[in-house]
Structures are given as structure tokens and as C-alpha cells.
Image: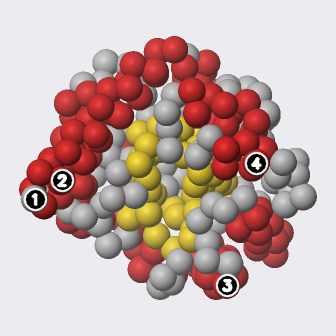
Amino acid sequence: MKLACSTDLLIPLRDDLGAAVHKAAESHLQGLAISLTPASPFHMGILAPGEISFLKEARHHHVKVMCLYGLTLFDKEPEAEKSYLKKAICFSHAVGSELVSLRVGFKPGERPLESLRETIAEAADFAEDLDVCLGIEPRKDSAVDSLAAALDLVDAVDSSHFGLVYNPAFHRFSDEKMPINAAEVVKSYLLMVVLTPEEGADPKETHQALLLLHKAGFDDYVLCHAEGHEAEHLSEAREEIKGLQDYLKELEKEDRFTSC
């Protein structure tokens, strides 16, 4: 597994991608995600394929821009959303990112999910041509508010370029119970794992979730993310990030030992 951080956590309330690259390099991260959450200073209006001078620094420091994270679908006009998604996919392709992570910003009953499915399906077809994937992240107070709802949407869209962005802690605020075999359930849908620093969280629980996902075959990016007031406490998250780095290195050592 590879560890990345979002810009919300690396440079809270700032929109300097060069600074985000340097922060990621200082923390010995393998990737960064450009956060497009409602709390982020970044948005598609200020991101354009021509404004990617920071990529030279990213390549120099071996930091991959691996995701556009938290792009939120609010607009009830499908054509506007389709255009919005296409801009994000084009920018993602331009910076070498292979994933645009999506959220749904409206609640159950506010808009037919069938309309959302059609919008995402068309965007996924467009993304496939540029070798970019779309991922849906279930969120509280969203029309996609459970792991089951997210998997149903992925199945309905039925595209090899649309999958799941999964937070192992999600079940803590969801009505659904965390299935014991969750790692096995999500592995064929999974594009990225998201971890959010939580007050009072037990690192052993996080490590256990990552171990189960690892055993199920997930070997891609784990994204550390925080937004809003949480994002202002990078110093408090550094210890957790360091612990994750050490734990993921231990998993790699075990794999090498097992393969000998």
C-alpha cells in the first residue's frame, strides 16, 4: 500500500500546489490528492490543464498527484454536472492522476438517483477514454449514505472505470453494521482507502482494517484526509501519519519474508 495526504491536510486553507508538494515530500509521502471538498480553497474554476507548473516539483520529489478528492455533486441540472465532471476528468488526466473521487451533496429524496446514475455513467465513459477512474465515497447526510448504497450505484453504472472510495471508519456513523467480511465484500469495487484522523480513535483498529484489506488483495493508495477545522491540526495528525507509514512498511516486510 502507498500513503498519500490531501491538500486540505497538507496546506489547510491554502491553494498553493507547490507548497503541498513540498509538504508531501517532507513527510516522505508517495502521493498527494488535490482536495475539491466544499471546505477546500481549490475548485475546478481555478484548476486548468495549463496551470500545472507544480508538476515539475512533484516529479523531482517523486510525489504523485494520485487523485482529485471530494468533488461534490450538488447541481440539479444534469448537463451542468456532466460538464463539471468532464473538466475534472480532463484536469486529472493532465496532471497524471488516475482517479476523481466523488461525493453526493444532496440528501435522500431530494433528487432521483436515476438521474445521478445517468450523469456518472456518461462521465465514466468519457473517463475511460482518458484512462481515468471515478470513485464514489459514501457519506453521512448524503443520498449515497451507506456502503450498500454505494455498491448498488457502482453496480447500476456498470463501468470498469467507476468504483468505490472506502473509509473503514464509515460504519461508526452509519446505521449499517460493519460486516465482518467487509474487506472481501468491497475488494472488487475498491479504488482507494480514505482515513480521517479522529479524536480518541484507536490506531490498532485502523491497522486491523488495513490488514484485512491488504489480505483481501488491496495494494493501492491509502489517503489521509481532514477538512474544515480538523485540517488546521496537521501537527496532531503527523504522529498518526508516521504510525501508518511504519505499519505499512511492516506489511511490506512481511510480504517479502513470505515470498522468500
Q: Find disc 4 in the rendering and name its residue.
A: 56
Q: Along the horizontal axis of the image, is 50 left or right of 84? A: right
Seen in the picture, residue 168 relative to 92 is either above or below; the reply is above
In this rendering, which labeled residue sits more in front, label 3 or label 1? Answer: 1
Seen in the picture, residue 124 relative to 63 is either above or below; the reply is below
In this rendering, which labeled residue sits more in front, label 4 or label 1? Answer: 1
Q: Find disc 3 in the rendering and name its residue.
A: 129
Q: Find disc 1 in the rendering and name its residue.
A: 260
Q: Amino acid at mark 2?
A: Arg
Discs 1, 2 touching: Cβ within 8 Å: yes
In this rendering, which labeled residue sits more in front, label 4 or label 3? Answer: 4
Discs 4, 2 touching: Cβ within 8 Å: no
Q: Residues within 10 Å of mark 2 (few under 14, many from 20)?
A: few
In this rendering, which labeled residue sits more in front, label 3 or label 2? Answer: 2
Q: Nearer the viewer, residue 249 or 229?
A: 249
- The quadrant in which residue 182 appears is bottom left
Discs 3, 2 touching: Cβ within 8 Å: no
Q: Which mark is residue 256?
A: 2
Q: Amino acid at mark 3?
A: Asp
